[in-house]
Structure formats: structure tokens, C-alpha cells
Image (spheres, rainbow, N blue to C red):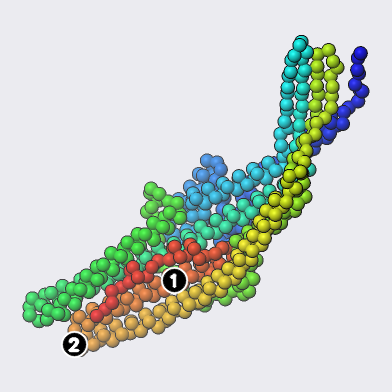
Amino acid sequence: MNHTLPRRVPAGARLTVAASAAVILLAGCASFSPDGGMGAVSELTRERTGQRVSLQRSPDQADTVSARVAELLKAPLTADGAVELALLNNRGLQASFSQLGVAEADLVQAGRMRNPVFSFGRLAAAGVVEIERAIMFDVLSLVTMPMARKAQQRQFEQSQFQAAYEAVGVASDTRRAYFNAVASQELVRYFQQVKDAADASSELARRMLAAGNFNKLAQMREQSFQADATAGLARAQQQALADRERLTRLLGLSGDQLCFTLPERLPDLPEAPTEPKDAEQTALDKRLDVLMAKRGTEATAKSLGLTRATRFVNALHVGYQNKSETDSPRANGYELELELPLFDFGSVRSRRAEAAYMQAVHRTAEVALNARSEVRESYGAYRTAYELARHYRDEVVPLRKRISEENLLRYNGMLIGVFELLADSREQVRSVTEYVQALRDFWVAETNLQTALTGRSPAASAASSMTPATGAEAPAGH
């Protein structure tokens, strides 16, 4: 008896055709962007540092960067030039940018349906051969694809913020390292002057003791001061070396590039300090870590909605199936696979998503609170550093200069001796070194303030890059 199947398109086949059409349509929409998302990263960085960034993908781009680096190194580096060089040449930053490509790949993948599964089975017994064929599509992923793609889009935007966050961090670290390196180089010259004066004083004391015109105790005091000045100069030289090497690492320089030059002096103190308006609100609106926390919370909320929507259905596969058997007509049909929520109603996934959302909410609140506090702290440090540097510039240094001029007149009138004159010159040099340190602290504080306002938390990197003042203090006079 022959059994003839109805000559109509099975429901499974119609569903498969519809799914295939959807796949083609959605696959056409999911593609990589021409710039890999770096355009937004560059703009975010430019708004906060004044410099653009780029990802070096080809030899031509690398050659362009090398030419620009060589051009920047021809002249003594400025602070802005150092930042531009670091953003171009820092390999760690380039590695961070490469992570953006991973995020974009995930985004594109989320816009494409999973590959269909083809199954084939053959059974033979007593001269009868049975063959089964089926092709299955993950329908659930197709239904949830728009939501999944939006979630990956948010993750991609989060990666763009993260890349800009890293760029701003490199820029602020470079500015701090630059000011420290210039100040350390300048301080070495002053410590050298102190040592030269101490050498002259000690030698004079030694000769006067040999001639019987000086007592042993006074001579040993001069000799002790010379020893202290020698140690102070050694510490200053080591500090200058360390600061320059830290700057070199951030700039990504090596080989012949190590001969780069720095200006002899720090930039002058501004005429007036900056007074930002609505500083705390600016930080909440502009800081990248705050924006990242907000976006992360929004993404978690969307993920929570997706989890709730699919909590009862974790897998749904639909496909076309046919079966042929020896001496029997081919049988066509469809196959449906659906996970039954008998033991897990999705409550675990839902509770986990809710906990992750509340965690994101509290993290965002913490980041915002810390940002406001860091702005207040950074501005206080900035104003203190400015007032201190101005005090040294307008009060201490001019006063020491007038004292030295008066002592020179007294020396010319034979009212004081040469040792008093040398001691006074050392005091004058010490006041200048303290002014240089105060000026350096001001520029570092200014960098921290700008970073806290629009970039990120300056606390961790600032603590590691701050030059300790105790390691290169000028020896006290006697």
C-alpha cells in the first residue's frame, strides 16, 4: 500500500525559509565601522587633553607617527608636546585601543544569527536503510537579537569610554612626569652651585687652619657641610635620572630618541589662579569614570530586562527535517526543541541580574561621591600650591636677594668675613631651590585639578608620580 504525503510546503519548511530570510537581512546590517570606533575615542580625548589619538593599524600609519615623533624631538619638549608624543607613541595605550576592536567584534557578532546546525543519521537493518536529515536554527537568539545587539552596543560604547579614560590617564601622567623631570633637572644645577660653594668654603677653612688662622671646630663644620652638599647633589642627580626615565617610559622612547632635550626652567607661575565655576557639577557631567559608571548601570538595567523576558525560555531551536527509508516514500516535517522550565524557572538568573544591577547602582553612587570630593581636594591643593609658589616668588626669594646684597656691602666694608658671605650665598641658593620645588608642585597640582574636573581620579597616579622633596633637600646652612 502506497502512502502519498500531501504535496504542500510543510510548516517547518516555511519557518526555515522565514528564518533564513531574517538571517540574510540581519547579517547585512551587522558590519564593522571604518574607524573601529576610534573617532569617538579621539573626540573624547581631545575635549579633555587638547590632543587627538589614533590606532596604528598599518605600516603607513606607523610611518606617519614616527615622522611626527621625530619632528617633536627636534626641539626641547613642551608640556603639550610631551602629551602629544605620549599619545602617539605609548605602546601600552595602543594595546588599550586594540581592546576596542575586540568589543566591536562582539557587537558585530551580536548582530548576526548563530550558524544553523545540520544533523545526519543513517540506520541499516535487514536490508532496510533509514536516513534522517535535519537543519536547526536557534530561533530564540533571532527573537532576542535586537535586545542583545543593543546590549553589545552599550558595551562597545563603554569600551570607547574606557579607551578615552586610558588616554586621559596617560596624558595626565605624562604632564606630571614632565614637570617633575624639568624641575629635577633644574634643581641639579642649584645643588651643584651649593656644592661648589661648600668646596670653596671647606678648602679655604683647611688652608686657614694650616696657617694657624682658624680653629679646628670651625674647620670641621665647613668640612661637614661640604659632605652634606656632596650627598645632596648625588641624591638630586639620582632623582633627576629617575624622573627623566619615568618620562621616557611614558613617551615610549628608545635608542637615539633618548637624547631628547627638556627646557631649562619650568613655566612661570600664572598671574592669577584658575577659579572653575560649578566644579563639582562639571566633574559629574564630564568625568569619564562617572560617565562609564552611569553607562554601566544603564547596560545592567537593560540586561536585567532581557533576563526577565527570557527567564522561562533558555533555548528554542526550530528546523526542517526529513526522513527516507528503503521502499518507503520520503517523510518531511519539522523539529522543535524547547527547554521545559520544570526544575529551573529562571529565578536564579533573574536574582543574579537584580543583584548585579543593584551593585552597579551603588558603584555609580560611590564614583560620583568620590568625584565631587576629589574635585574639592584637588582645588584646595591647587590654591595652596599657587599661594605657596607665589609666596616664594614674591617674598622669600627677593628678601634673600636683598640680604645677599647687604652682606656683600658689609663684606666690602670688611664688616664680615668670607665665610659669612659664602654661607649667605648658600642660603640664597636654598631659597631658589625651594621656589623651584613649590613651582613644580603647583604645576602638578594644576594637572591633578584638570584631571579631576574632566578626566578621571588623579589620586592613584598622582601619588606614584609625586617627587619626594626629602630626597633632594638643600643642606642647611650653619
Of residues 19 and 36, the one nearer the viewer is 19
- Mark seen at residue 414: 2
Q: Position of residue 204 (x, y in %)?
A: 15, 75
Write down the residue under mark 1. Answer: 441
Q: Amino acid at mark 1?
A: Asp
Q: Residue at x 87, y 28 (%)?
A: 10
Q: Residue at x 56, y 43 (%)?
A: 57
Packing grade of label 1 (10 A; few <14, some 14-19, many >=20) is many
Please say if the residues under marks 1 and 2 sit with CB atoms less than 8 Å apart: no
Of residues 337 and 418, the one nearer the viewer is 337
Q: Quadrant of the C terminus?
A: bottom left
Q: Is residue 209 left or right of residue 144?
A: left
- Quadrant of the rendered image containing residue 5: top right
Q: Amino acid at mark 2?
A: Met
Q: Position of residue 49 (x, y in %)?
A: 56, 61
Name, please, the residue furthest toward the front.
343
The mark that comes first in sequence, 1 or 2, is 2
Q: Please give the count of numbered marks on the rendered protein.
A: 2
Vertical position of residue 387 compared to residue 415: above or below: above
Q: Secondary structure at mark 1?
A: helix
- Mark seen at residue 161: none
- Quadrant of the rendered image containing residue 166: bottom right
State how far apart marks 1 and 2 are (Cα).
41 Å
Q: Quadrant of the N terminus?
A: top right
- Quadrant of the rendered image containing residue 233: bottom left
Q: Residue at x 18, y 73 (%)?
A: 223
Q: Residue at x 76, y 40 (%)?
A: 339
Q: Is residue 311 left or right of residue 328?
A: left
Q: Nearer the viewer, mark 1 or mark 2?
A: 1
Q: Secondary structure at mark 2?
A: loop
